[in-house]
Image (tube, rainbow, N blue to C red):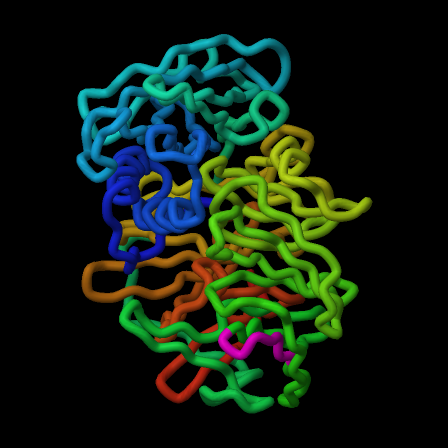
Amino acid sequence: MNRFIPCRTRLSGRASTLVAAGAGIAAGTAAGVVAVAIAAGLALGGSTGAGNLDGLLEVAHVPPLLTVPGEDVTLRYAIVCPPPGGDIASGAPCDGSGDVYIRAGQSGPFTKLALERGSDSIEGRWFVRVPAQIATSTDGFSYYAVLRNDATGASTTLPAGGEAAPQRSLPLRKAVTIDLGAHDFGQARHADERVVSAPWGTGADEAGLSAGKTGRIGPSSFDVSAGGAVTVLDEINRRAVRWTHGRAAATALDLTPGIDDMSVGPDGTIYVLDARDNGSNPAVRAFAADGKPKWARETGDRTWAKLEMGPQGPVVDELPSEEWMPAADASGPLERRAQARNGMSGRPLSDGSELVVLRVGTSELRLARVAGGDVEKSWRILSGTPLGEVQLTEQHGNAVVVVLKTYTEAQDQFLVLVLDGGGVAKQFSLDPAEWAESAPLARFRLSGSSLYQLGSSPAGFFVDRFDLEVNR
């Protein structure tokens, strides 16, 4: 999933160097999320070296997941690897290199292509143009890269699963094209129901608020059951709170307060994607419905964007691999290598298909439902107003619900689209209501035929419901 998050974090040294590189390659993802994700990863110690500054190697890449006929396909990478003894904040040229292993289609042997150093490689940018016979394959193409710090010998494979779970690119041959034109910020839909409303505080029917120099943090995530019960991750108060018909019931969780994501399984298990700050990878933590810890596993990659429930358990959208990785399957939680080996370009759905999403610049969103390696339905959404983060993509019967942000320098709104084979079956706008921060992509949930939005104000937080009946 491609995303955009305004970066409020002040970066320096190694982080700012890689953020600049990431911004340069972010043709499909707005640079803000690259900045936030990389900054988080650096704080967690993302080096593949021997644990000292001379071994550092940080990378970023935006995969061209969905292509259109006639499109020039170039793979771009950011590599930051300070020279031995060099100033980590100097921005000196990186003594690095890399190779891309690529093939037409999704099986068979790979061809090795060496990365070229761009004219702006002082900021860590490398590239390789995909040969036409591969880029135009009717079955798409797949690839992975091995990136190196030649000064130290440190290396990393991207995506983390390498040959077992390469990046995959598929062609869009019959996409439904939707031109939204310029967005009208004067119209915003009102909720059909405010299902939860709670003031800031520590009481049973309140929510925690942390306010500091970097901003305000409220409930970081939420989920909604098939019956409409709302569970909110109230990490400031170290608990999850479940609202049923307006009544709150709190469950204590052994978590350090932070900005984490959460999903609730069909059996009531609470899964929390814990960002952590102890120098290790983030972790998915599973709690029983009563709050008792069940298991915890570090993620396959060093940073994350979103946690969702997959067909067999929780799945995490991870960076820098830019893949959805399962944290567990039917047999139980998975170790990091098993997660990486099972990475997917799209979010897995219950019917065995997956949803693949790609932002192209700031004016186009591409979306495809893929089954058996083939694109079954696809859409190209064009906009005269810049498009930001993609908050939600969910299957809804034979349709797909998309929530994304549209913005100018002066204002922004969320845009809700219900897509079917004919184009847009329903469309409306929502005001952001983002007074306090939450997890980056945790503002919306779809349950049944209703869309739910997590919002906040100086008075407290709330969850609103919007019906999605479609009348063609």
On-image quarter of the C terminus: bottom right
Residue 7 seen in the current view: yes
Q: Is residue 358 magenta?
A: no
Please name whichever residue, 149 or 208, is drawn nearer the observer in this view of the structure.
149
Residue 352 vs residue 210: left or right? right
Residue 90 vs residue 264: left or right? left
Q: Position of residue 299 (x, y in %)?
A: 58, 45
Is 372 located above or below residue 278 in the figure? above
Stretch in magenta: 236-242
Name the residue at the right extreme.
Answer: 331
Q: Residue at x 67, y 75 (%)?
A: 228
Is 304 located above or below residue 117 in the figure? below
Q: Which picture quadrant has residue 95?
A: top left
Q: Residue at x 81, y 45 (%)?
A: 331
Q: Position of residue 309 (x, y in %)?
A: 66, 54
Q: Position of residue 427 (x, y in %)?
A: 45, 62
Q: Which picture quadrant has residue 445?
A: bottom right
Please name whichever residue, 273 or 2, is drawn nearer the observer in this view of the structure.
273
Please name whichever residue, 75 or 431, is drawn nearer the observer in this view of the structure.
75
Residue 402 vs residue 262: left or right? left
Is 235 located above or below residue 140 in the figure? below
Please name whichever residue, 18 or 2, is drawn nearer the observer in this view of the structure.
18
Q: Residue at x 69, y 30 (%)?
A: 372
